[in-house]
Image: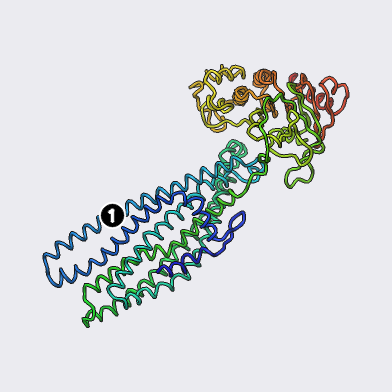
């Protein structure tokens, strides 16, 4: 029987199938990796479960063997004393079997759920290390599906495979042993039929792996579309696109239905195969064995014990036959998970990287070039600029000129292709990521607030901050007054991405967060461009407080907010076109002067109207 299983179910583990995304791996290699990385840590729990599986298997074989004394000693011999002891034996057998089955099921469930939890933690920790380009190239819904669908499928490998290999295989061995004990000729007749079933079942397993991988990929797209639609519901409704989005969703749901139904149909094909072959085996045994009982070549008790063992062996045999399909489904999830885990971040600490301490905040760009993946032209082309420690420097220019890219180079959201970015004469690539980020605070136009309390969102700036420090940061950010006016004050839940707050309120919370961090370098990426005049006035006052005494690099859309900057760089087509103070650049009558005049005229027109 073990040989049968090896040549059947586990033969499929050597087959290769295409994976949805990433490189495909052999099932055998995936199973080995899954055991090594996810199952091996729980070997003790698994051995305990296997012990109880052995007890279940022994009790199963015992219940089949008991048919012999029941028939021969009780019904044929009409022995009342034997009836009592057989009844006790039956009760004890089933009680032990039930208790052991509960124990093994609980242990296997624990292992399966721990594997899910461990891999979810592992995947989140891995993704948190990845650089920005990874998230730009992978849809959020697809990544979320790795946590839910793919890792959930892996539990089937652990639970179903261990249960089938353990309880079902050992129960089958126990029952086959009873069959051979009662009549080896009938046993050979019964089991010779089943190997025929494994060839088509192995082929079904291959199909299951492919269908499951495609289903999981489509599920990722489904989650992405849901996320985008719900987050952009204002735009959907404003443009009357409900019907369009409904049609897109219907098409994707129908595709998921087709794949899921195909999977269910493929899995169900094993049932008629096993049912038919099982019927053939039972029919042959009944006819052949029945004649031997009539001819008194076999005792009735032995024959009924054999039939009982054969019928009881049918269910674990079916589960073993279906095991390959379950394993292939789980391995499809494991492959998609491992494909993500095997992608290493491109931006990591260099060997020998050191913590930067005592940062004064001097920033230097030295002939920096950079291109985004797949871009036709460089985003930065031989950029050289300086941000003196403690000064306020602004980057201005038309959209798409490279201003945000310059900003992203400082905290190493991206790495330069050529040249260097230095902080206090230390190349940022020679500093540890942790120490680099500890010395930088960022406030951007796109404020990210978490669906948590106001207090928690401000405290994100520095772990372990006291209540007094949080309130003090809010006061400096001109946010305390509006916060105490909220329904629950600092305990108010702001909603997903701060949806319950106005734009100006969200900005001031972000500034309070940066205030609390108290980093020597401050990066401001168009922090007021999306605000109305009154909100901008309040936020600008908070920003003035925040920038005081810090090295500040500011990307400004409204040039009126940077007229007092110590130095202004005009960025166009990835190059520095002009630099100087506001008055100097206006006097040059160049790009900056034209931009300023254009905005001044627009603001004057808007004010007069």
Number of marks drawn? 1
**Can residue 184 be seen?**
yes
* Residue 334 pos. (x, y %): 53, 53
* Residue 257 pos. (x, y %): 51, 55
511 and 257: which one is in front?
A: 511
**Can residue 254 be seen?**
no
Residue beneath the point at 64% across and 44% down = 345
Please name the colour scheme applied to the rendered image: rainbow
Q: How many other residues sit within 10 Å of disc 1, few (<14), some (14-19) or many (≥20)?
A: some
Query: Quick one: which residue is furthest to the right in this view?
Result: 588
Question: Quarter holding the C terminus?
Answer: top right
Whether residue 545 is situated above or below residue 82 in the rendered picture: above
Left or right placement of residue 11 versus residue 400 in this view: left
Residue beneath the point at 53% across and 44% down = 122
Whether residue 357 is situated above or below residue 485 in the rendered picture: below
Secondary structure beneath disc 1? helix
Residue holding disc 1: 98
Query: Looking at the rendering, which quadrant does residue 540 occupy?
Result: top right
Left or right placement of residue 92 versus residue 483 in this view: left
Question: Quarter holding the N terminus?
Answer: bottom left
* Residue 386 pos. (x, y %): 79, 28
* Residue 441 pos. (x, y %): 65, 27
Query: Quick one: which residue is furthest to the bottom in this view?
Result: 295
Residue beneath the point at 59% across and 42% down = 127
170 and 396: which one is in front?
A: 170
Query: Quick one: which residue is furthest to the front in this view?
Result: 352
590 and 368: which one is in front?
A: 368
Left or right placement of residue 36 versus residue 283 in this view: right
Whether residue 304 is situated above or below residue 94 in the rendered picture: below
Query: Looking at the rendering, which quadrant does residue 55 occupy?
Result: bottom left
């Amino acid at each position: 029987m073990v040989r049968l299983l090896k040549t059947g179910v586990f033969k499929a583990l050597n087959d290769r199938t295409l994976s949805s995304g990433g490189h495909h791996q052999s099932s055998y290699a995936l199973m080995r990796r899954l055991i090594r990385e996810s199952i091996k840590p729980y070997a003790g729990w698994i051995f305990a479960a296997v012990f109880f599986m052995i007890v279940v298997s022994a009790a199963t074989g015992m219940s089949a063997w008991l048919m012999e004394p029941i028939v021969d000693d009780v019904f044929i011999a009409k022995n009342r004393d034997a009836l009592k002891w057989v009844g006790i034996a039956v009760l004890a057998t089933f009680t032990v079997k039930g208790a052991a089955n509960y124990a093994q099921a609980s242990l296997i469930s624990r292992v399966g759920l721990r594997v899910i939890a461990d891999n979810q933690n592992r995947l989140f920790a891995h993704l948190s290390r990845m650089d920005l380009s990874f998230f730009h190239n992978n849809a959020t819904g697809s990544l979320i599906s790795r946590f839910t669908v793919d890792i959930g499928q892996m539990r089937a490998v652990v639970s179903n495979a261990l249960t089938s290999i353990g309880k079902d295989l050992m129960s089958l061995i126990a029952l086959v042993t009873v069959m051979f004990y009662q009549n080896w000729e009938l046993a050979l007749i019964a089991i010779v039929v089943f190997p025929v079933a494994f060839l088509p079942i192995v082929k079904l397993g291959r199909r299951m792996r492919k269908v499951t991988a495609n289903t999981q990929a489509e599920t990722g797209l489904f989650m992405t579309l849901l996320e985008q639609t719900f987050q952009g519901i204002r735009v959907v409704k404003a443009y009357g696109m409900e019907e369009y989005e409904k049609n897109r969703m219907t098409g994707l749901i129908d595709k998921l239905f087709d794949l899921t139904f195909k999977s269910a149909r493929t899995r169900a094909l094993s049932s008629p195969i096993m049912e038919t072959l099982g019927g053939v085996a039972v029919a042959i045994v009944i006819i052949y064995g029945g004649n031997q009982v009539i001819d008194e070549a076999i005792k009735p008790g032995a024959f009924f014990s054999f039939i009982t063992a054969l019928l009881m062996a049918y269910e674990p045999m079916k589960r073993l036959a279906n095991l390959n399909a379950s394993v292939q489904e789980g391995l499809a999830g494991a492959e998609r998970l491992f494909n993500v885990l095997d992608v290493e971040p491109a931006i990591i600490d260099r060997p020998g990287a050191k913590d930067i301490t005592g940062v004064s905040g001097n920033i230097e760009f030295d002939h920096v070039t950079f291109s985004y993946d797949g871009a036709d032209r460089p985003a930065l082309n031989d950029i050289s600029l300086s941000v003196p420690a403690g000064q306020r420097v602004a980057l201005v220019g038309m959209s798409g000129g490279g201003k945000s890219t310059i900003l992203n180079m400082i905290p190493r959201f991206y790495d330069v292709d050529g040249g260097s970015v230095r902080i206090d004469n230390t190349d940022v690539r020679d500093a540890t990521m942790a120490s680099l980020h500890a010395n930088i605070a960022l406030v951007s136009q796109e404020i990210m607030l978490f669906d948590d309390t106001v207090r928690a969102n401000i405290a994100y700036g520095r772990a372990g901050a006291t209540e007094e420090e949080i309130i003090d940061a809010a006061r400096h950010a001109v946010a305390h007054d509006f916060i105490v006016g909220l329904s629950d004050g600092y305990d108010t839940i702001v909603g997903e991405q701060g949806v319950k707050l106005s734009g100006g309120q969200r900005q001031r919370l972000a500034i309070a967060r940066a205030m609390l961090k108290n980093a020597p370098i401050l990066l401001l990426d168009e922090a007021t461009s999306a605000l109305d005049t009154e909100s901008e006035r309040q936020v600008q006052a908070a920003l003035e407080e925040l920038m005081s005494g810090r090295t500040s690099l500011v990307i400004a859309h409204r040039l009126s907010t940077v007229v007092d900057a110590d130095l202004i760089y005009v960025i166009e087509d990835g190059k520095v076109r002009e630099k100087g103070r506001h008055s100097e650049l206006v006097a040059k009558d160049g790009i900056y002067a034209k931009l300023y005049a254009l905005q001044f005229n627009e603001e004057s027109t808007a004010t007069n109207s």
